[in-house]
Image: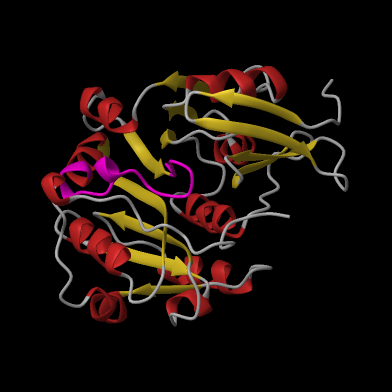
Amino acid sequence: MNEAIPVSRVTDHGTAKLMPDVDRERAWLLTVDGAPQSYVDLDEPAHLEFEYTRRLGHVLDTVAEPGRALDVLHLGGGAFTLPRYLAVTRPGSRQDVVEADRGLLDLVAEHLPLPDGSGITAHGADARAWLEAAPADSADVLVADVFGGSRVPAHLTSVDYAHRAARVLRADGVYVANLADGAPFPFLRAQLAGFATLFEELALIAEPGVLRGRRFGNAVLVAAHRPLDTAALARRAAADAFPARLEHGPALRAFIGDARPVRDEDAVPSPEPPAGAFGIG
């Protein structure tokens, strides 16, 4: 039984804090160096609190018929919000979670343990190194949600990285990533340009104010070799408690514009969020 008191620990990559939600008996917020990373309700693992997590959930709900078990690779672990979600919405799924911060894995295992038989296996490793060693054609879905603090590390932003991700996906597999940027979106446009060289189908989901350049925020990139159910995905995103817009086809190509893919030698982390963009309290 978790005591409803905050927990703070210095882990490999920063200071991690677990804070109980006063409104939900066994729900916890994980932050690393003050940046919100995960929200988990142990009693209701299908509850997704963060806006971007809900959008990732919409993608996971529509990649296959409801309830079908999937083989999923998660790059970035946090408190395992989405693996827990999939374990209850798609029981029987086999999930590997790769998290570079082993101290964080230990903290989560101690205070927010996974239920028995969850089908979730945690691995303390660098995401890029794991991809390079992983078997080809081994995942139905690859979920990338890797942030060093509030920034995506540079070695996970290049088209070379995208090639490695594509190799691990099956022919009908889907890549989905949580990214963050603000107008004029140089980082996000370059990410889309890189994945466009590898995948026939692309979509982007974000809050309309972010897409209009009014504020910095998260955007979910979706890539596949097969047609995506963009109609269902757009409906779910628009009807959510935090409405979002889906861009694909000509509108998304226009958004990418003349952006070019970034190679390893030129890769940089995603931009530093403005002060307070992702803070809490």
Quick one: quadrant of the C terminus? Answer: bottom right
Is residue 92 visible to the viewer in this orientation of the structure?
Answer: yes
Magenta segment, prevailing SS (helix, strand or loop): loop
Magenta stretch holds residue 146: yes
Q: Whole-percent x and y of residue 65?
A: 49, 50
Compared with 141, 189 (above or below) is below
Asked which quadrant contains residue 43, the reply is top right
Tag count: 0
Residue found at the very far front of the displayed protein: 275
State left or right for residue 248 relative to residue 9.
left
26, 45: nearer the viewer: 26
Q: Residue at x 48, y 74 (%)?
A: 210
Q: Residue at x 57, y 34 (%)?
A: 80
Q: Residue at x 44, y 82 (%)?
A: 212
State left or right for residue 275 relative to residue 138.
right
State left or right for residue 14 relative to residue 110.
left
Q: Whole-percent x and y of residue 27?
A: 78, 39
91, 166: nearer the viewer: 166
Is residue 119 visible to the viewer in this orientation of the structure?
Answer: no
Q: Whole-percent x and y of residue 48?
A: 66, 50
The magenta segment: 145-161
Magenta stretch holds residue 51: no
Quick one: quadrant of the N terminus? Answer: top right
Q: Whole-percent x and y of residue 44?
A: 76, 40
Q: Residue at x 53, y 20 (%)?
A: 103
Compared with 130, 265 (above or below) is below
83, 109: nearer the viewer: 109
